Amino acid sequence: MSQTDPSLALKALTDWWGEMGVDVDETQIRALRKAAESRTAEAPAPKSSNEQPQRLPRHLMKKTHADWVNEAKTLAADAQTLDALKTAIEGFDGCILKESARNTACFDGVQGAPVMVIGEGPGAEEDARGLPFVGKAGQLLDKMLAAIGLSRKENTFITNVNYWRPPGNRNPSDEELELCRPFVDRMIELGQPKLIIAAGGVAAKSLLQSRVGIMKLRGSEHALKTPGGYEAPMFPIFHPAFLLRRPEEKSRAWRDLLNIQARLEELS
Ligand code: URA
């Protein structure tokens, strides 16, 4: 009889809890996962020779947060194309969220498009498909973009400030965002968008390194400059998931979209 890997069994359970909307005590889950993985790591090697070698879990690699941030910076700087950057992000083991995620959701849409939308991070549907904004919020985002002549099939590139689904759909932590940031900056430098749309408060605050909330950040243009020196105007908007819960805010969202359209016309 084949034995279930305890770490994988735990992941299946926490994924299921997340999908059911149950709040997960992450400290406890992390401790349980560590214990399960250590037991797996200590177990004798399987006799069968056709099993794949297991990657060492992040917590056993003995690297500090600063080491991982530096590794992310090096990997990002080395990537010369968006596809190479995607491969680098998928291979990066520095973010704990990757351990519970099913897939890495890097980007979708047209590479080199004039508009780049940057959201918060994958939810359940994005995690399952490995693509950003493909769930209900993504469908509303597509409609919002279409209203001003934008589409991920023709002229828009879509990504997030974090590439792995947080358990229970919580917000990514500052540390998790810091680990992804070198990749986000490099994506902007390689994509060279004329204009950036930050979808929601988490993305806007993270990109601007600001504590100011979306209610104040939306409605005006901000300058976003990467460490590599690429600069583009950035417009924070309400997150489509927020608009699904608060449809009365759609008129303000519409005003923001019209501002973006007018600015894009100026830029082209
Ligand atoms: N919300 C986001 O911010 N990004 C996604 O990719 C999906 C939902």
Image: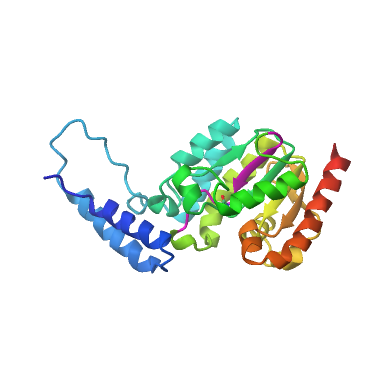
Work out whether residue 252 or residue 225 is closer to the camera in this orientation and state it: 252
Indicate left or right for 42 with 134 as reference. left
Instruction: Give the residues drawn in magenta, as a range.
Output: 154-166
Q: Reply above or below: 99 against 29.
A: above
Indicate left or right for 18 with 85 as reference. left
Residue 24 is covered by the magenta coloring: no
Work out whether residue 265 or residue 56 is closer to the camera in this orientation and state it: 265
Q: In which quarter of the image is residue 239?
A: bottom right
Q: Main secondary structure of the magenta part?
A: loop
Give me the residue at 29% from left, 63% from top. 32
Quadrant including the N terminus = top left
Q: Position of residue 149 (x, y in %)?
A: 77, 41
Q: Where is residue 260 in the image (x, y as percent from the top left)?
A: 80, 49
Q: Quadrant of residue 146?
A: top right
Residue 165 is covered by the magenta coloring: yes
Q: Reply above or below: 242 against 141.
A: below
**Tally of marks:** 0
Q: Position of residue 216 (x, y in %)?
A: 75, 67
Quadrant including the C terminus = top right
Give me the residue at 63% from left, 63% from top. 242
The colour scheme used to paint the residues is rainbow
Q: Position of residue 263 (x, y in %)?
A: 85, 46
Task: Tell me, yes or no, if residue 225 can be seen here.
Answer: no
Indicate left or right for 98 with 210 as reference. left
Give me the residue at 56% from left, 31% from top. 83
